[in-house]
Image (cartoon, rainbow, N blue to C red):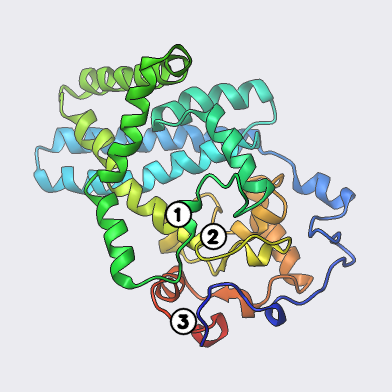
Amino acid sequence: MVDTLIPPPEARPDVLPSDELLANGMLRPERRRAMRAIDDRRNAISVVGLWLSVALLFGVATWSGRWWVVVLAFLLMGPIYVRFAILMHEAAHRLLFSSKRVNDLVGTWLIAYPAFVPISLYRRSHFAHHREEFGPEEPDIAFYRGYPCKPADLRRRLLRDAVGISGWKNFKVLLLATRSKQGRAIAVPILGVQVLLWAISWAATGAWWAYPVLWFAPWMTQWRVLNRLRAIGEHGGMEASDDRRATTHNVRQHWFARFWFVPYNTGWHLAHHVDMGIPWRNLPAFHAELEAAGYITPAITYPSYRALWRAATSKGTPTVAEQA
Protein backbone atom coordinates (compact mmCIF):
# COMPACT_ATOMS: atom_id res chain seq x y z
CA MET A 1 0.00 0.00 0.00
CA VAL A 2 1.23 3.52 -0.88
CA ASP A 3 0.22 7.14 -0.28
CA THR A 4 0.86 8.31 -3.81
CA LEU A 5 -0.52 7.73 -7.29
CA ILE A 6 2.92 7.97 -8.89
CA PRO A 7 4.24 4.59 -10.07
CA PRO A 8 7.50 3.71 -8.27
CA PRO A 9 10.72 3.71 -10.31
CA GLU A 10 10.86 -0.10 -10.36
CA ALA A 11 7.48 -0.11 -12.17
CA ARG A 12 8.94 2.08 -14.91
CA PRO A 13 11.70 0.01 -16.55
CA ASP A 14 14.43 1.79 -18.49
CA VAL A 15 13.87 0.26 -21.93
CA LEU A 16 14.54 3.20 -24.27
CA PRO A 17 15.87 3.64 -26.84
CA SER A 18 14.68 0.51 -28.63
CA ASP A 19 14.68 -0.72 -32.20
CA GLU A 20 11.55 1.31 -32.96
CA LEU A 21 11.63 4.12 -30.39
CA LEU A 22 14.04 6.93 -29.57
CA ALA A 23 15.23 7.74 -26.06
CA ASN A 24 12.29 10.16 -25.58
CA GLY A 25 9.75 7.50 -26.58
CA MET A 26 8.98 8.88 -30.02
CA LEU A 27 9.08 6.59 -33.02
CA ARG A 28 12.12 6.73 -35.24
CA PRO A 29 11.65 9.33 -38.03
CA GLU A 30 10.69 6.96 -40.84
CA ARG A 31 7.98 5.31 -38.69
CA ARG A 32 6.83 8.56 -37.13
CA ARG A 33 6.10 10.18 -40.50
CA ALA A 34 3.54 7.49 -41.30
CA MET A 35 2.05 7.61 -37.78
CA ARG A 36 1.55 11.39 -38.05
CA ALA A 37 -0.73 11.12 -41.10
CA ILE A 38 -4.03 13.02 -40.65
CA ASP A 39 -7.17 11.46 -42.11
CA ASP A 40 -8.98 14.58 -43.37
CA ARG A 41 -11.97 12.74 -44.80
CA ARG A 42 -12.76 10.72 -41.70
CA ASN A 43 -12.19 13.72 -39.43
CA ALA A 44 -14.64 15.74 -41.53
CA ILE A 45 -17.15 12.93 -41.09
CA SER A 46 -16.55 13.06 -37.32
CA VAL A 47 -17.26 16.80 -37.20
CA VAL A 48 -20.42 16.47 -39.31
CA GLY A 49 -21.52 13.44 -37.30
CA LEU A 50 -21.10 15.35 -34.05
CA TRP A 51 -23.36 18.16 -35.23
CA LEU A 52 -25.89 15.66 -36.57
CA SER A 53 -25.97 14.11 -33.10
CA VAL A 54 -26.74 17.52 -31.62
CA ALA A 55 -29.52 18.10 -34.16
CA LEU A 56 -30.98 14.67 -33.45
CA LEU A 57 -31.02 15.22 -29.69
CA PHE A 58 -32.62 18.65 -30.04
CA GLY A 59 -35.18 17.36 -32.53
CA VAL A 60 -36.24 14.31 -30.55
CA ALA A 61 -36.36 16.20 -27.25
CA THR A 62 -38.47 19.10 -28.54
CA TRP A 63 -40.81 17.13 -30.79
CA SER A 64 -41.53 14.27 -28.38
CA GLY A 65 -43.48 16.33 -25.85
CA ARG A 66 -42.28 14.00 -23.07
CA TRP A 67 -40.33 15.31 -20.08
CA TRP A 68 -38.26 12.15 -19.68
CA VAL A 69 -37.03 12.45 -23.27
CA VAL A 70 -35.84 15.98 -22.49
CA VAL A 71 -34.04 14.69 -19.39
CA LEU A 72 -32.40 11.92 -21.43
CA ALA A 73 -31.30 14.42 -24.10
CA PHE A 74 -29.91 16.67 -21.36
CA LEU A 75 -27.85 13.78 -19.99
CA LEU A 76 -26.58 12.77 -23.42
CA MET A 77 -25.38 16.32 -24.04
CA GLY A 78 -22.62 15.68 -21.47
CA PRO A 79 -20.81 13.19 -23.73
CA ILE A 80 -21.54 15.50 -26.67
CA TYR A 81 -19.63 18.32 -24.94
CA VAL A 82 -16.76 15.94 -24.22
CA ARG A 83 -16.58 15.26 -27.96
CA PHE A 84 -16.49 18.97 -28.75
CA ALA A 85 -13.65 19.35 -26.23
CA ILE A 86 -11.57 16.51 -27.69
CA LEU A 87 -11.99 17.63 -31.31
CA MET A 88 -11.13 21.16 -30.20
CA HIS A 89 -8.04 19.74 -28.51
CA GLU A 90 -7.06 18.11 -31.82
CA ALA A 91 -7.58 21.40 -33.64
CA ALA A 92 -5.46 23.21 -31.03
CA HIS A 93 -2.66 20.76 -31.82
CA ARG A 94 -3.38 21.37 -35.54
CA LEU A 95 -4.03 17.67 -35.99
CA LEU A 96 -7.69 17.81 -37.02
CA PHE A 97 -7.05 18.71 -40.68
CA SER A 98 -3.82 18.73 -42.64
CA SER A 99 -4.58 22.22 -43.99
CA LYS A 100 -3.76 24.75 -41.28
CA ARG A 101 -6.40 27.13 -42.66
CA VAL A 102 -9.14 24.50 -42.62
CA ASN A 103 -8.01 23.20 -39.24
CA ASP A 104 -8.21 26.63 -37.62
CA LEU A 105 -11.42 27.64 -39.37
CA VAL A 106 -13.33 24.49 -38.43
CA GLY A 107 -11.67 24.21 -35.03
CA THR A 108 -12.58 27.78 -34.12
CA TRP A 109 -16.06 28.35 -35.53
CA LEU A 110 -17.60 24.89 -35.60
CA ILE A 111 -16.03 23.37 -32.49
CA ALA A 112 -14.36 25.76 -30.03
CA TYR A 113 -16.68 28.79 -30.09
CA PRO A 114 -19.88 26.71 -29.88
CA ALA A 115 -18.33 25.03 -26.80
CA PHE A 116 -17.48 28.45 -25.22
CA VAL A 117 -13.71 27.98 -25.72
CA PRO A 118 -11.34 30.76 -26.86
CA ILE A 119 -9.13 28.39 -28.80
CA SER A 120 -6.21 30.81 -29.22
CA LEU A 121 -5.87 31.15 -25.44
CA TYR A 122 -6.46 27.44 -24.95
CA ARG A 123 -3.71 26.56 -27.45
CA ARG A 124 -1.21 28.78 -25.64
CA SER A 125 -1.97 27.39 -22.18
CA HIS A 126 -2.27 23.81 -23.38
CA PHE A 127 1.17 23.90 -24.96
CA ALA A 128 2.50 25.12 -21.61
CA HIS A 129 0.92 21.98 -20.14
CA HIS A 130 2.80 19.84 -22.66
CA ARG A 131 6.11 21.65 -22.18
CA GLU A 132 6.18 20.68 -18.51
CA GLU A 133 3.33 18.88 -16.84
CA PHE A 134 3.04 20.21 -13.27
CA GLY A 135 5.50 22.96 -14.14
CA PRO A 136 5.20 26.62 -13.13
CA GLU A 137 2.92 27.37 -16.11
CA GLU A 138 0.64 24.35 -15.70
CA PRO A 139 -2.85 25.73 -16.52
CA ASP A 140 -4.85 22.86 -14.99
CA ILE A 141 -2.99 22.35 -11.73
CA ALA A 142 -6.24 22.75 -9.76
CA PHE A 143 -7.57 19.59 -11.45
CA TYR A 144 -4.44 17.52 -10.76
CA ARG A 145 -3.03 18.36 -7.35
CA GLY A 146 -4.21 17.14 -3.98
CA TYR A 147 -4.60 13.45 -4.77
CA PRO A 148 -5.01 11.03 -3.12
CA CYS A 149 -7.72 12.86 -1.18
CA LYS A 150 -10.61 11.95 1.08
CA PRO A 151 -13.77 10.76 -0.72
CA ALA A 152 -15.65 13.69 0.80
CA ASP A 153 -13.22 16.13 -0.82
CA LEU A 154 -13.88 14.77 -4.30
CA ARG A 155 -17.64 14.63 -3.67
CA ARG A 156 -17.56 18.31 -2.71
CA ARG A 157 -15.70 19.25 -5.89
CA LEU A 158 -18.05 17.21 -8.08
CA LEU A 159 -21.08 18.73 -6.35
CA ARG A 160 -19.81 22.22 -7.16
CA ASP A 161 -19.48 21.11 -10.76
CA ALA A 162 -22.89 19.43 -10.88
CA VAL A 163 -24.86 22.41 -9.57
CA GLY A 164 -23.21 24.96 -11.85
CA ILE A 165 -20.86 26.76 -9.45
CA SER A 166 -17.77 25.86 -11.47
CA GLY A 167 -19.58 26.63 -14.73
CA TRP A 168 -20.67 30.06 -13.53
CA LYS A 169 -17.07 30.94 -12.61
CA ASN A 170 -16.03 30.22 -16.21
CA PHE A 171 -19.00 31.95 -17.78
CA LYS A 172 -18.53 35.01 -15.56
CA VAL A 173 -14.95 35.37 -16.86
CA LEU A 174 -16.33 35.36 -20.41
CA LEU A 175 -18.89 38.06 -19.57
CA LEU A 176 -16.37 40.24 -17.73
CA ALA A 177 -13.99 40.03 -20.68
CA THR A 178 -16.40 42.21 -22.69
CA ARG A 179 -15.42 45.18 -20.53
CA SER A 180 -12.06 45.61 -22.25
CA LYS A 181 -11.16 46.03 -25.91
CA GLN A 182 -8.80 43.07 -25.87
CA GLY A 183 -11.30 40.93 -24.01
CA ARG A 184 -14.13 41.83 -26.38
CA ALA A 185 -12.10 40.58 -29.33
CA ILE A 186 -12.13 37.15 -27.68
CA ALA A 187 -15.47 37.06 -25.88
CA VAL A 188 -17.82 38.72 -28.37
CA PRO A 189 -17.36 36.13 -31.17
CA ILE A 190 -18.03 33.33 -28.69
CA LEU A 191 -21.13 35.01 -27.29
CA GLY A 192 -22.24 35.84 -30.83
CA VAL A 193 -22.04 32.16 -31.79
CA GLN A 194 -24.17 31.32 -28.74
CA VAL A 195 -26.84 33.81 -29.81
CA LEU A 196 -26.79 32.32 -33.30
CA LEU A 197 -27.16 28.80 -31.91
CA TRP A 198 -30.12 29.90 -29.81
CA ALA A 199 -31.75 31.50 -32.84
CA ILE A 200 -31.16 28.45 -35.03
CA SER A 201 -32.46 26.01 -32.42
CA TRP A 202 -35.55 28.16 -31.78
CA ALA A 203 -36.30 28.50 -35.48
CA ALA A 204 -35.71 24.81 -36.19
CA THR A 205 -37.67 23.38 -33.27
CA GLY A 206 -40.12 26.13 -32.34
CA ALA A 207 -38.99 25.73 -28.73
CA TRP A 208 -37.34 28.80 -27.16
CA TRP A 209 -36.19 26.65 -24.22
CA ALA A 210 -34.17 24.17 -26.33
CA TYR A 211 -30.93 26.17 -26.20
CA PRO A 212 -30.89 27.04 -22.46
CA VAL A 213 -32.01 23.56 -21.36
CA LEU A 214 -30.17 21.35 -23.84
CA TRP A 215 -27.08 23.44 -24.64
CA PHE A 216 -26.26 25.98 -21.96
CA ALA A 217 -27.34 23.99 -18.88
CA PRO A 218 -25.32 20.83 -19.73
CA TRP A 219 -22.23 22.97 -20.33
CA MET A 220 -22.73 24.63 -16.94
CA THR A 221 -23.25 21.39 -15.03
CA GLN A 222 -22.63 17.82 -16.13
CA TRP A 223 -19.86 18.68 -18.60
CA ARG A 224 -17.95 19.99 -15.58
CA VAL A 225 -18.35 16.68 -13.77
CA LEU A 226 -17.15 14.65 -16.75
CA ASN A 227 -14.25 17.01 -17.38
CA ARG A 228 -13.02 16.75 -13.79
CA LEU A 229 -13.28 12.95 -13.76
CA ARG A 230 -11.38 12.77 -17.05
CA ALA A 231 -8.70 15.16 -15.77
CA ILE A 232 -8.12 12.98 -12.70
CA GLY A 233 -7.85 9.99 -14.99
CA GLU A 234 -5.17 11.76 -17.02
CA HIS A 235 -2.89 13.44 -14.48
CA GLY A 236 -4.46 13.40 -11.02
CA GLY A 237 -1.89 13.06 -8.26
CA MET A 238 1.14 12.81 -10.56
CA GLU A 239 4.29 14.96 -10.53
CA ALA A 240 6.69 16.93 -12.72
CA SER A 241 9.17 14.54 -14.31
CA ASP A 242 11.11 13.84 -17.48
CA ASP A 243 9.51 10.38 -17.39
CA ARG A 244 6.00 10.73 -18.83
CA ARG A 245 4.94 7.66 -16.86
CA ALA A 246 5.27 9.78 -13.70
CA THR A 247 3.23 12.67 -15.14
CA THR A 248 0.40 10.80 -16.90
CA HIS A 249 -1.76 7.83 -15.93
CA ASN A 250 -2.34 4.81 -18.13
CA VAL A 251 -5.81 3.24 -17.93
CA ARG A 252 -7.19 0.21 -19.73
CA GLN A 253 -9.92 1.37 -22.12
CA HIS A 254 -13.51 0.08 -22.03
CA TRP A 255 -16.46 1.00 -24.26
CA PHE A 256 -18.52 2.62 -21.49
CA ALA A 257 -15.77 5.08 -20.53
CA ARG A 258 -15.00 5.76 -24.19
CA PHE A 259 -18.63 6.68 -24.76
CA TRP A 260 -19.09 8.93 -21.72
CA PHE A 261 -15.87 10.87 -21.19
CA VAL A 262 -12.85 9.59 -23.17
CA PRO A 263 -14.03 9.46 -26.80
CA TYR A 264 -11.88 9.82 -29.91
CA ASN A 265 -9.06 7.72 -28.37
CA THR A 266 -8.28 10.36 -25.77
CA GLY A 267 -8.00 7.60 -23.16
CA TRP A 268 -4.63 6.63 -24.66
CA HIS A 269 -3.35 9.76 -22.95
CA LEU A 270 0.10 8.56 -21.98
CA ALA A 271 0.86 7.91 -25.65
CA HIS A 272 -0.36 11.44 -26.45
CA HIS A 273 2.05 12.92 -23.91
CA VAL A 274 4.97 10.89 -25.15
CA ASP A 275 4.36 12.32 -28.64
CA MET A 276 1.77 15.09 -28.94
CA GLY A 277 2.22 15.11 -32.73
CA ILE A 278 0.34 11.83 -33.22
CA PRO A 279 -3.29 12.36 -34.40
CA TRP A 280 -6.04 10.83 -32.31
CA ARG A 281 -6.85 8.06 -34.78
CA ASN A 282 -3.31 6.69 -34.50
CA LEU A 283 -2.91 6.83 -30.71
CA PRO A 284 -3.92 3.16 -30.12
CA ALA A 285 -1.30 2.01 -32.65
CA PHE A 286 1.36 4.20 -31.04
CA HIS A 287 0.31 2.96 -27.60
CA ALA A 288 0.83 -0.60 -28.87
CA GLU A 289 4.38 0.34 -29.94
CA LEU A 290 5.10 1.64 -26.43
CA GLU A 291 3.75 -1.58 -24.94
CA ALA A 292 5.78 -3.73 -27.33
CA ALA A 293 8.93 -1.87 -26.27
CA GLY A 294 8.17 -2.53 -22.59
CA TYR A 295 7.73 1.18 -21.84
CA ILE A 296 4.05 0.73 -20.87
CA THR A 297 3.57 -2.29 -18.60
CA PRO A 298 0.75 -3.83 -16.53
CA ALA A 299 2.49 -2.46 -13.43
CA ILE A 300 1.54 1.12 -14.39
CA THR A 301 -1.85 0.33 -15.97
CA TYR A 302 -5.09 0.78 -14.04
CA PRO A 303 -7.71 -1.82 -14.96
CA SER A 304 -10.44 0.85 -15.18
CA TYR A 305 -11.19 4.49 -14.40
CA ARG A 306 -13.20 3.38 -11.39
CA ALA A 307 -10.06 1.73 -10.01
CA LEU A 308 -8.08 4.92 -10.56
CA TRP A 309 -10.73 7.12 -8.91
CA ARG A 310 -10.89 4.68 -6.01
CA ALA A 311 -7.13 5.01 -5.61
CA ALA A 312 -7.40 8.80 -5.88
CA THR A 313 -9.85 9.02 -2.98
CA SER A 314 -8.15 7.02 -0.28
CA LYS A 315 -4.94 7.41 1.68
CA GLY A 316 -2.85 4.27 1.71
CA THR A 317 -4.10 3.46 -1.78
CA PRO A 318 -3.44 0.09 -3.37
CA THR A 319 -0.77 0.04 -6.03
CA VAL A 320 -1.78 -0.46 -9.64
CA ALA A 321 -0.61 -4.06 -9.51
CA GLU A 322 -2.70 -4.73 -6.38
CA GLN A 323 -5.83 -3.44 -8.15
CA ALA A 324 -5.37 -5.45 -11.34
State the CA–CA distance, disc 2 to disc 1. Answer: 8 Å
What residue is shown with label 3? Answer: 317
Mark 2 and mark 3 lie on one chain; the one further toward the N terminus is 2
The residue at the point 65 percent across, 47 percent down is 130
Secondary structure found at label 1: helix
Nearer to me, 22 or 285:
22
Mark 3 and mark 1 lie on one chain; the one further toward the N terminus is 1
The disc labelled 2 sits on which kind of residue?
A: His
The reply, left or right, for residue 92 in relation to residue 171 is right
Residue 208 percent across, percent down from the top left? 15, 23
The disc labelled 1 sits on which kind of residue?
A: Phe
Residue 235 marker = 2
The reply, left or right, for residue 229 in relation to residue 24 is left
Residue 291 percent across, percent down from the top left? 72, 70
The residue at the point 17 percent across, 47 percent down is 71
Residue 143 marker = 1
Task: Please tell me how many numbered marks the rendered image carries.
Answer: 3
